[in-house]
Structures are given as C-alpha cells and as structure tokens.
Amino acid sequence: MKKLIVLCLIFISHIVASQAIGGEEEPEDVWYSRIYKSDIPTDAPIFEQYAVQNIFRGNGVRANIKHNPQAKLFKTVIQNQEEGDVNFAGVFRIIEWGCGAGCISVALLNKKTGELYFPKNIKFITNVAAIFEDEGSVNYEANSPVLDYRADSTLLIIKGSIDDGNHPLSTQLGVSYFLWDTHRLKLIRFVRSSHK
C-alpha cells in the first residue's frame, strides 16, 4: 500500500513540476487519433457503387445463439440489439459492442435466417476515438461514426485501426472499405491516415 501511495505522489509531483516549468498544457483532445477528410481520396468507394436492390422488411428471425459458441459469449448484447430493421446489405443488422477503452467489436445478424457472422478479419476495431474533421479545425458535431453502413448497400466503412487477431493494425490508422461477399466481409481498400 505504501508503494502505491509513493508512486501516486511521484506521478502527481511530475505533473505539477512539468506545468511549473512552463510546459504548455496538452489540448483536451490530445488522445484522439485523427483522420481528416483530406485523407480520403476523391475516388474512394461510395455506398451508391454497391447498391442493394431488395431490402428485407419485417420482424425477421431471432439470432441463432444456441448453435454458435462465439454468440453465446455475447448473448445479452446480441439480444438487446437484434430488434429493429435491417441496416446493412439488404438483410443484415449490424450489432456492435465495446471491448475496452477505444475499442469495439461487431457481428452481423442475417434477419432472414437468424445466422450470425463474426467477421474473421475484424476481431476488434481500435482507435475508435478517431476524429473525422476538416484540416485545422475540430468540429465535434460533424464527426462521423466509426462504422458507416446503410441498409441499401453492401459497403461497410470503418474509421480506426483493425485487428484481425493475428496482425494488429494499431499502427495503421485509417479508413477501411469492406464489401459483403456471400459469407464474409472482403477488404477492398485501405486509406492510411496522414496524421496521428
């Protein structure tokens, strides 16, 4: 216990000393990783390029959790989010949950069949605090979500760093463009952020 108190006192004194020396205080948003609109090329994929003609309407089938070991781990969050309309690729409802500070995970629920997909190439999305802003100004109201998707398109856009469980991309902050392709999300383009 004494060691903990000593460490806390050292930490606090370090902060006080650095401010007393005249060091500028860090801006409040220093912990954000930045993705600027200027990072996105003009030929980046857009939703309309990957349009879906038919969108499933109706209540749909409940998630098949019983026969999916991975789904059993996230049963409560899946059941809490499975209600509602299709929001991706004509038949899916994207379910997302936090996996720690600045981290989310996703699953795709097929509302027609109840089948759940846990993308193997997207175990975690980190740096989810990325600000999508204009160069030189922070406009918190204009921030876009980490995940962008639409019911009428097979395009999924992720802003942040993706970890597939084998090759962490935490150093590769940017925008990833995925297409739903039969039974998987296929990465079609990655645009690295020019800022950190």
Image (cartoon, rainbow, N blue to C red):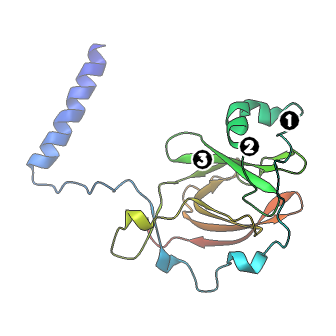
What is the residue that sits farthest to the bottom in this orientation? 42
Q: Which mark is residue 104?
A: 3
Above or below for 97 versus 180 = above
Disc on the earlier residue, 1 or 3: 1
**Split into 4 quadrants, where in the image is the N terminus?**
top left
Count neighbours of disc 2 (C-alpha within 10 A) and say few if under 14, some if 14 to 19, many if 20 or more. many
Name the secondary structure under disc 1: loop
Q: CA distance from mark 2 to mark 1?
A: 15 Å
Q: Which mark is residue 68?
A: 1
Q: From the image, state whether disc 3 or disc 2 is nearer to you.
A: 2
| Type of the residue with mark 2 | Glu
Q: Nearer the viewer, residue 179 or 14?
A: 179
Name the secondary structure under disc 3: strand
Q: CA distance from mark 3 to mark 2?
A: 17 Å
Above or below for 11 versus 84 = above
Image x and y of residue 20, in percent: 9, 47
**Split into 4 quadrants, where in the image is the C terminus?**
bottom left
